[in-house]
Image (cartoon, grey):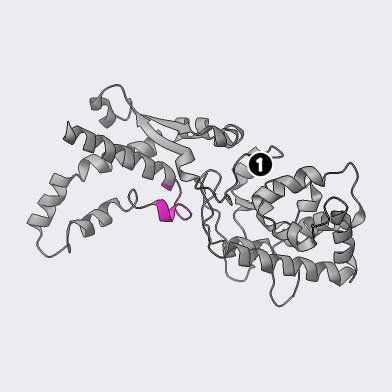
Amino acid sequence: MINIYEVSQQVLAERHYEAVVEELMKKDSKSPATLEKWFKAFNVNYTLKHIITARPEDLRIMMSKCKSDKYPECILELYDMYVKKFSKSDRYIGDRKQKYNAVQLMKSLEIKVCPLCNRNYINNVKSKGRLEKRTGQLDHFHNKSSYPFLSMSFFNLVPACYGCNHTKARFELEQTPYAEVDLDPLIRFSVSFNKIEDIFDEQHLRVSLDNHPSIQQNVDVLGLLETYTEEHNEDAFAVVKAFKNYNDVWQNSMIGNIKGLFKDKDHLSDMLLSEYIGLKDRLKSKPLAKLKKDIYEQLEAYQQSSISR
């Protein structure tokens, strides 16, 4: 689980709201006012804009306050807008010139890797003579069948890979990638071994996952523990091998033997280990970046503690 770091999120949410309103007015100019009347019956401060642009913490409150056994036609319009138009790559909502739909939303978030698992690419794909397509999907953090009034709420639309979207299904998660809290320290990957010699033997090395209780539901529903500990030992071992093979002694030897090829040691280190170091800012674009970053940091910490003894 990683954050969707995007400084213009609120700006994107505002544009999203404008497109929703424009689309509603195409059918009936009174539609936005009708929707607001329904929401205000639950809370006098609720406006359509508040519903569409509400942050994750507010969505949870609305989810409990506005739920009904039977929804009016005006609410189901939001559900239909998502299913019949917004989610389609060849259909759009709002101003036709803007061509705004789920494809454009995914692009605007500038995220290439699924934020729920950090394993699979979800970037859009262009091919000659065809419309731009999503390789990822949009998961409704609070599912649209139970909460159709949140079907088009910006922060309820979470980019995800096919696997995570279908694994999550209608289950609720505790943490959202849009969370304002830093999710990075809530999940921590490491490699476990019985003795130091085992760390360089792939057969004895195992991925471990520790998490804060506040994100336990995400780990359980998405099957992150099983997936990472059973499927990614080879990827973890690649980090260990790089850490071992490109150590300080080796790097100093390279700089000394090949004069002028590298500016300095940092330059060489970045070339060799960029896949593992400084990845916090690239979690959105590199599959398994979280796993690799955490394990490399574990090895660095182990090395420093060994030196200081």
Report x, y in % for residue 251.
16, 50
Residue found at the far top of this picture:
194
Q: Using the image as rendered, state which of residue 191 and residue 90 is in the foreground.
A: 191
Residue found at the far front of this picture:
44
Residue 71 visible here: yes
Chain part drawn in magenta: 280-289
Kindly identify the amino acid type of the residue bearing the numbered disc 1: His
Q: Residue at x 83, y 56 (%)?
A: 44
The dominant secondary structure in magenta is loop
Q: Which residue is drawn at 50% across and 34% down?
A: 212
Q: Which residue is drawn at 16% across and 46% down?
A: 248
Q: Is residue 216 left or right of residue 68?
A: left
Q: Using the image as rendered, state which of residue 88 and residue 211 is in the foreground.
A: 211
Residue 143 visible here: no
Q: What element carries label 1?
A: helix
- The residue carrying mark 1 is 166
Q: Using the image as rendered, state which of residue 170 and residue 126 is in the foreground.
A: 170
**Is residue 281 part of the magenta span, yes or no?**
yes
Residue 236: image quadrant is: top left
Report x, y in % for residue 85.
77, 62
Tag count: 1
Which part of the image, by quadrant, shows the C terminus? Answer: top left
Q: Is residue 145 left or right of residue 171?
A: right
Residue 88: image quadrant is: bottom right
Report x, y in % for residue 132.
62, 66
Give the vertical position of 129 relative to 121 (above or below).
Answer: below
Give the vertical position of 28 relative to 222 (above or below).
Answer: below
Q: Is residue 226 left or right of residue 95?
A: left
